[in-house]
Image (spheres, rainbow, N blue to C red):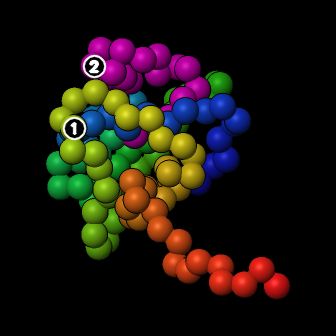
Amino acid sequence: MIGLPTGTKVWIAAGATDMRRGFDGLASIVQTQLREDPFSGHVFVFRGRRGDRIKCLWWSGDGLCLFAKRLERGYFVWPQATSGTIWLSTAQLSMLLEGIDWRRPMRTSQPQHAA
């Protein structure tokens, strides 16, 4: 993923989105349904109905960027809400993009000894 500037927020659009939408259609959703500014420099993430595709919309300062990903196996973990937005950290976005459950990340081991 492209490194995002410090202070960039990541917003997930709850519910399913029509993945046929492009730049203008997704920017319209950001403005009308999420009540946010698509040109704010924040990242807006949308998931398709089947759960194996996502699109991220981001204003880079001189143009809108649209990133898409399809998982070959599994699905992107999404909130149960059907409307509204949820804020993620950039670390949680990285987990989401890898198909990891970003809601309950668990370390694989705990340190046993300090030395």
Q: Is residue 85 above or below residue 90?
A: above
Q: Is residue 11 magenta?
A: no
Res. 71 image quadrant: bottom left
Instruction: Tell me which residue sits at (27%, 19%) in the image.
Output: 33
- Name the spot of residue 102 as percent of width and height, x first: 42, 56
The structure residue drawn at horizontal position 54% and vertical position 43%, both measured from the top left corner, is 89
Query: Quarter holding the C terminus?
Result: bottom right
- Residue 114 placement (x, y as % from top left): 77, 80
Q: Is residue 89 left or right of residue 82?
A: right
44 versus 111 height, above or below: above
Q: Is residue 60 left or right of residue 65?
A: right
| Residue matched to label 1 | 81
User: In the rendered image, is residue 24 in sight?
Assistant: no
The front one of 72 and 13 is 13
Callout 2: SS: loop
Q: Which residues are magenta?
A: 24-45
Judged from the image, the secondary structure of the residue bearing numbered disc 1 is loop
Q: Which mark is residue 103?
A: none
Residue 54 shows in this picture: yes
Residue type at mark 1? Ala
| Dot 2 amino acid type | Gln
Closer to us: 52 or 84: 84
- Kindly report the distance in space between the C-alpha atoms of the residues bearing marks 1 and 2: 14 Å
Please state the total of marks drawn on the protein image. 2
Residue ID at (67%, 47%)? 3
The answer to whether marks 1 and 2 mark residues whose Cβ atoms lie closer than 8 Å is no
Q: Residue sitting at 52 percent across and 78 percent down?
A: 108
| Mark 2 surroundings: few (<14), some (14-19) or many (≥20) residues within 10 A | few
Q: Of label 1 and label 2, which has the lower sequence position?
A: 2
Expressed as whole percent of the image width and height from the top left, the position of residue 51 reads 23, 55
Q: Which residue is mark 2?
A: 33
Q: Quadrant of the N terminus?
A: bottom right
